[in-house]
Image (cartoon, helix red, strand yellow):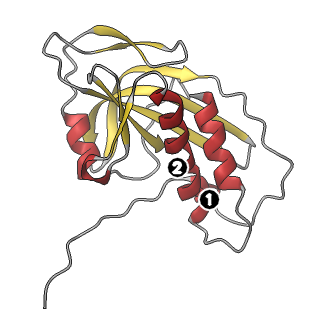
Amino acid sequence: MIDAVRDGLAEGLRLDAAAPKIAPGFYAWTGTVASIRRHLVTDGWRPADKQNLPTIVSPDGRVRLIVASGDSGTGDPAATPSTSNPKGRAVEEHVRSNDPGRHQQIQLALDIDVESNRDESGACQTWMLLYRHDIARLRSVAEVSLPLAIEGGRVTEWGDRAIIETPIQFPEMEVRPTDVSALDDVDFEIHPAREG
């Protein structure tokens, strides 16, 4: 997980001032998604892109992982984090399918043990890898957490949260005169074109 967060940061930082303001966040997100997929596929996980939402699914099909940038509560055990931007319908459907009344132990790679809420039904449960790159403080934080409720595209309640120590060293760099949120992910909706 740490490698994926580092890889995403590297993708976001490789752009120069000529890139659009939103590009670092998009590149950081896509770099993190690609890296986590590359790492977990070696353990039998498989990429999925249902409804154009990039996820990765465990070998038994019972755990789905979504990658998203988080807000300032990410990585803080005393806070209630959320994604940095509201999520769309696909994420909302996955979160709403998580049932907070079930339990089973799962392992989300790299020795991160978290307690999921799964019963014997075999239904797939959705977890999130939330990360936040704080350019102003030159640090990154991350967690793998179980979203239980979502409203208006933002997660409002979490089950288990596994805070990941992310000893990421930012390279020597000149901070661009841009929003710190430039490394947040970018949301957009795709609608079918009307004929005529």
Rendered image quadrant of residue 147: top left
Query: Compared with residue 151, is residue 146 higher up or lower down, i.e. above or below?
Result: above
Quadrant occupied by the N terminus:
top right
Q: Earlier in the sequence, mark 2 or mark 1?
A: 1
Identify which residue, 108 or 185, lies in the foreground: 108
| Cα–Cα gap, marks 2 and 1 | 9 Å
Q: Residues within 10 Å of mark 1 (few under 14, many from 20)?
A: many
Identity of the residue drawn at 32% across and 36% down: 156
Identity of the residue drawn at 64% across and 41% down: 7
Determine the residue located farthest toward the right in the rendered image: 172
Q: Amino acid at mark 1?
A: Pro
Q: Is residue 68 left or right of residue 132?
A: left
Rendered image quadrant of residue 123: top left
Q: Amino acid at mark 2?
A: Trp
Q: Describe the element under mark 1 as helix, strand or loop.
A: helix
Is any part of residue 196 visible from this angle?
yes
Q: Mark on residue 24? A: 1
Residue 91 location in percent, x, y? 29, 44
Q: Mark on residue 29? A: 2
Quadrant occupied by the C terminus:
bottom left
Identify which residue, 63 or 100, lies in the foreground: 63
Query: Compared with residue 196, is residue 57 higher up or lower down, i.e. above or below?
Result: above
Q: Is residue 101 left or right of residue 74?
A: left
Identity of the residue drawn at 49% across and 43% down: 33
Q: Residues within 10 Å of mark 2 (few under 14, many from 20)?
A: many
Q: How many marks?
A: 2
